[in-house]
Image (spheres, rainbow, N blue to C red):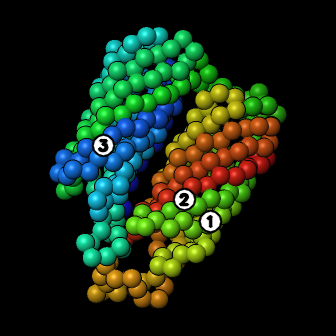
């Protein structure tokens, strides 16, 4: 569970940025070719990123990075980077460099089995990029990423990306409301979500899952949620659980909100015998209550004053197996 300091740092840094009267926010994504330092594999790499400007030359970003499927490795994770830029938002050409910590989840396999061992390690990501900002708030870029890992393989990636700047729309009031208090934005939200749960295994079977959640807005940028998850079709680990999460959220425009969350999933999982071997396919059927650490990103689009569409990407970090839960559904605010 050692990734807690990084995620708390992400939330604290973003909160400080929001409180300082944020100068601009960007959403972007990239994809490219990754080169492993110790092998000949050349998988693709991809990421989604949220960036926030502090000044004309300093920015910070939160990145969910996927380093592809290498031989006997499935590695991804979350990184926080501090950026220096020649200018903020163009238009025109902008050069920038970034550096920060990287918390990685690496599913590794034994040569004689399919069962993965989830290893959670630390590293750093260094980046250099050239961005081109257009006049219509869109931008494109080329970036070189270098990952230096502790007790894991290093990698280098050349990627291309595209993004959108919300500099002139940041902090806008939610759709259909003119402020807090009487007649203001509702503080509670009920969500019904569906989607697949994908374990970090090889192969990676998809199990159907659904979720019922209650979310409460603490203020304009902080929310808390309780979510009941039900997963069907699993054979080796948990089937149901309750997640409690704290969220940092940002209104990018009157309809679109994004956020990052951190919390715990309380569930019942099979107990692990003292002589457990991850290479075998069966474990004890005894049960024990166990909390997992859950990190997440979310986006919500408000289509009407009380109805919205919400997307949630949960990462559940377990003892021997990590998994992703991709959820989409509707919410009602009240």
Q: For the image shown, how many numbered marks are present on the structure?
A: 3
Quarter-wise, where is residue 92 in the image? Answer: top left
Q: Nearer the viewer, mark 2 or mark 3?
A: 3
Residue 305 position (above or below residue 333): above
**Tag 1's secondary structure?**
strand
Q: Name the residue: 47% across, 35% down.
A: 29
What is the secondary structure assignment of the residue under circle 2?
Answer: strand
Please name the residue that numbered disc 1 is placed on.
209
User: Residue 285, percent across and down?
Assistant: 47, 89
Q: Is residue 55 left or right of residue 259?
A: left
Viewer-closest of 105 and 140: 140
* 240 relative to 27, above or below: below
Residue 166 visible: yes
Mark 3 or 1: the one toward you: 3
Q: Residues within 10 Å of mark 2 (few under 14, many from 20)?
A: many
Which residue is the site of mark 3?
Answer: 34
Residue occupied by mark 2: 325
**Sequence-first disc among 1 and 2:** 1
Q: Earlier in the sequence, mark 3 or mark 1?
A: 3
Sequence-wise, which precedes: disc 2 or disc 3?
3
């Amino acid at each position: 569970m050692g990734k807690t300091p990084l995620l708390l740092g992400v939330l604290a840094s973003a909160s400080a940025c929001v409180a300082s009267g944020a100068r601009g926010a960007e959403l972007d994504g990239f994809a490219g070719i990754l080169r492993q330092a110790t092998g000949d594999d050349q998988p693709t790499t991809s990421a989604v990123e949220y960036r926030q400007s502090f000044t004309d030359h300093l920015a910070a970003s939160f990145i969910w990075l996927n380093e592809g499927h290498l031989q006997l490795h499935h590695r991804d994770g979350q990184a926080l980077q501090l950026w220096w830029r020649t200018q903020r938002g163009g238009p025109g050409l902008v050069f920038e460099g970034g550096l920060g910590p990287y918390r990685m989840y690496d599913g590794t396999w034994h040569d004689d089995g399919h069962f993965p061992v989830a290893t959670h390690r630390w590293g750093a990501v260094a980046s250099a990029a050239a961005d081109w900002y257009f006049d219509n708030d869109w931008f494109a870029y080329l970036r070189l990423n270098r990952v230096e890992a502790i007790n894991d393989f290093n990698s280098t990636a050349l990627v291309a990306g595209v993004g959108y700047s919300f500099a002139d729309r940041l902090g806008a009031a939610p759709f259909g409301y003119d402020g807090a208090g009487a007649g203001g934005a509702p503080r509670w939200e009920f969500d019904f979500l569906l989607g697949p749960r994908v374990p970090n295994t090889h192969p990676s079977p998809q199990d159907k899952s659904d979720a019922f959640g209650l979310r409460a807005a603490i203020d304009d940028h902080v929310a808390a949620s309780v979510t009941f998850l039900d997963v069907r079709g699993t054979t080796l680990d948990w089937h149901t659980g309750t997640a409690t999460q704290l969220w940092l959220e940002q209104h990018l425009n009157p309809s679109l909100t994004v956020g990052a969350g951190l919390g715990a999933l309380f569930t019942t999982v099979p107990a692990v015998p003292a002589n457990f071997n991850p290479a075998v396919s069966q474990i004890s059927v005894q049960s024990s209550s166990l909390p997992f650490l859950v990190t997440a990103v979310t986006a919500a689009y408000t289509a009407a004053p009380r109805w919205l569409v919400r997307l949630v990407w949960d990462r559940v970090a377990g003892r021997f197996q990590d998994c992703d839960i991709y959820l989409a559904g509707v919410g009602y605010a009240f």
